Amino acid sequence: MKTILAFGDSLTFGANPIPGGARHPYDDRWPTTLERALGGQARVIAEGLGGRTTVHDDWWDAADRNGSRILPTLLSSHSPLDLVIIMLGTNDLKPFHGRTAQEAANGMRRLVQIVRGHYQKPGDTAPKIILVAPPHLCDTDHPEMMLHFGDDAILQSKLFARWYKQRADEYGVAFFDAATVASPDPADGVHLDAENTRRIGEGLAPLVKEVLGL
C-alpha cells in the first residue's frame, strides 16, 4: 500500500467557512475523500494547520505556522512516503507575509527543495510531489477576514495556478489547480463548504493514480 502525506493549511484541516462553525467531519475532508477514491491502494495522512504558510513565521499563534520549518519533522515521522501533496499559499498573501502569488510560488519551490533534500542517505528514495494551487478567494461580507489578506488578495489568488505550474515544470513535479474543482464559501471568502472540500480529493484522485502508477 502506498503512503501519501497531504501537507496544507486550514483547507486541508477542514475548517468551516461559517464563523465559529465546527471542523468538517472526517469523511468530508479532502484527504479522506482522496483516500476513499483510491480504493484501498493508498493511505493519506492529513497534516493541515490553519494559518500555515510556505516559509513565513507568524507569531500570532501558539502553533508553528512556518511550513518550511515543520516539514522535515513530518517527513521523518511519516516515512517512508511515496507521495507528498502540498497545498499552501493562501496565507502567504497576508500583508505581513509575501502578499503575492509569485512569492507564494517561491515558497512552494523551497518546500520541493526540502522534500528532495531530506532523502539523501544511502538507500533513500524521495517521494514524488504534487504542487496544488489553492482555490481562489472571493468577495465576502465577513467583517474581518479580508482585512487579514489585503485589497489585492483576491486578484493574487487567481494567479496561483500560473506561478505554481511554472515552479512545478521547473522542478519536474506534478501540478493540480484546485480552483478548477472548488470555490470558497462567501460566508468568509476563504474556506470551503463540505462539498467543495470533498471535490479537491475527488479531483486529485486521477492525477494521484497516474503519478503513483495505481
Image: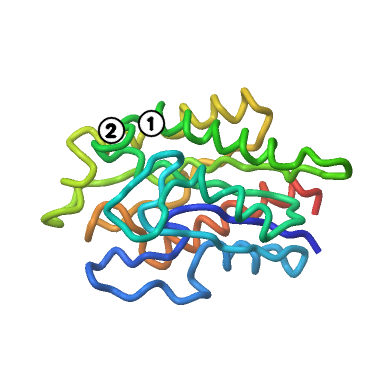
* Count of labels in the image: 2
The residue located at (60%, 49%) in the rendering is 85
- Comparing 38 with 60, the one in front is 60
Residue type at numbered disc 1: Ala
Badge 1 element: helix
Quadrant containing the N terminus is: bottom right
Q: Do the residues labelled 2 and 1 touch (CB within 8 Å)?
A: no
The residue located at (75%, 51%) in the rendering is 82
Residue 179 visible, this angle: no
- Comparing 116 with 93, the one in front is 116
Residue tagged by mark 2? 155
User: Which badge, 2 or 1, comes first in the chain's sequence?
Assistant: 1
Q: Residues within 10 Å of mark 2 (few under 14, many from 20)?
A: some
- Comparing 56 with 88, the one in front is 56
The residue located at (33%, 47%) in the rendering is 58
> Residue 180's x, y, as percent?
47, 44
Quadrant containing the C terminus is: bottom right
Residue tagged by mark 1? 101
